[in-house]
Amino acid sequence: MKDHQSHLFEEEFTGWLAGLRALADKCREDDGAWRKVASQGLLSLAAPEAAGGAGVGYEAACLALEAFAEESGLSGLPFAMAAQMWACQEPLLEFGNKAQHDRYLAPLMAGTAVGAFAATEYDSGSDLLSLRTRADQHGDGRWRLSGAKTFVTNGPTADVFLILARTAEGSALFGLTAFLVRRETPGLHIGKVIDKTALAGAQLSSLHLDDCVVDDADRLGGTSGGFAVLMHAMRYERAFILAPTLGLMAGALRQAIEHVRSRTQFGQPLGSYETIRQRLVRMHMSLTSAREVLYATARRADRGALDHGRSSLTKLHVSTEFNRFCQELPDLYGGYALLPETGATALLADAVASRYYSGTSDMQMKIIAEGLGL
């Protein structure tokens, strides 16, 4: 009976995925794509039914992100949606109460609100001990936040920000607290869109907090519990933020194969040259390897067995294979790689970016080494 139910679910999900692909094909130039995709349920896939989600798990969510990216050819939009799913929704699921779920999580999953996670600061980067944004509690129980954040994904359009602030001196383990801050809150100022050369369609901005007053009811988790909120967000973001890149790689590989089959050089198809064939095989190996690792990690998460070491390994491995893949891609096109329609140089920029967000590759190495007892 259990196998029968599983088969029925797979058939239903396969049909849903086909519908998502059809929608994605129409999203390339659509400013309303976020809400349209969210209305199909993509943002709610990993959340349990008890919290208003679809409850189909992390593997299904990653499959959906991959499919959407492959069919749409978009890099920034699925990246931005994934950033909300893993760095905003996951912490809300873990640390939020019923009122916070109703006020924030439900509209985020439905796509009627956009979320942004704000931790990075200008001079601190990954150094949590250097965070300068402060939150001081006053006699009325409310908190006043002052400071600045940068590289805030979804910042220009976000309706709610999950912000880390220092509430005590000393170790980040005990000195940080997380707050949910609505866009219209007085004292919250959103900077202009940050120009970048990768992840077209994803918008980043700075964020300034000038005596921004937040109710205690909008504190996420306990006072001084911000480090736990951050680590939870990073565990899922590092594991799954690169799921869309699998779709980008798959689409690029398919397009490259079509290109070498259709073009000739010295009277022979490009695909008949051994150097070309070897490049394509190496690209296929990178995609296959990245897929195997990421989906094995997703299945771990579905079993409740995802740890920080595995998340870092996944982020490091997939970003490494993404870069290897994109180093091969331009040489399949030669000078045509510089033309926008090949997408080769844009994808290469996306690959370079993947080495730095959610923690640099060097940081992932450090975490993995520590897990090995080094």
Image: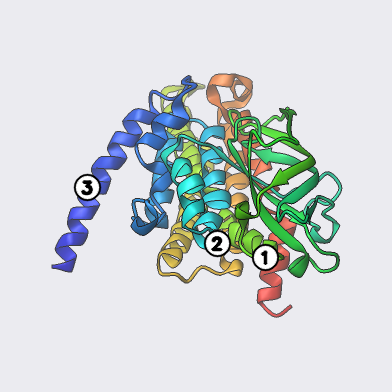
**Mark number, residue 274:** none
Q: Residues under labels 1 and 3: Cα distance?
A: 40 Å
Q: Amino acid at mark 3?
A: Glu
In the rendered image of this protein, does residue 182 appear above or below residue 336?
Answer: below
- Residue 83, horizontal then vertical, whole percent: 57, 45
Q: Quadrant of the N terminus?
A: bottom left
Residue at horizontal 74 percent and vertical 78 percent from the top: 374
Question: As rendered, which of 278 and 197 lies closer to the eye?
Answer: 197
Q: Amino acid at mark 2?
A: Phe
Instruction: Give the crowd class for mark 1: few <14, some 14-19, many >=20 residues within 10 Å.
Output: many
**Mark number, residue 225:** 1
Residue occupied by mark 2: 95
- Residue 369, horizontal then vertical, whole percent: 70, 72
Identify the element where label 2 is drawn.
helix
Residue at horizontal 60 percent and vertical 19 percent from the top: 339
- Report whether 362 appears left or right of 35: right
Of the image marks 2 and 1, the number of the one nearer the N terminus: 2
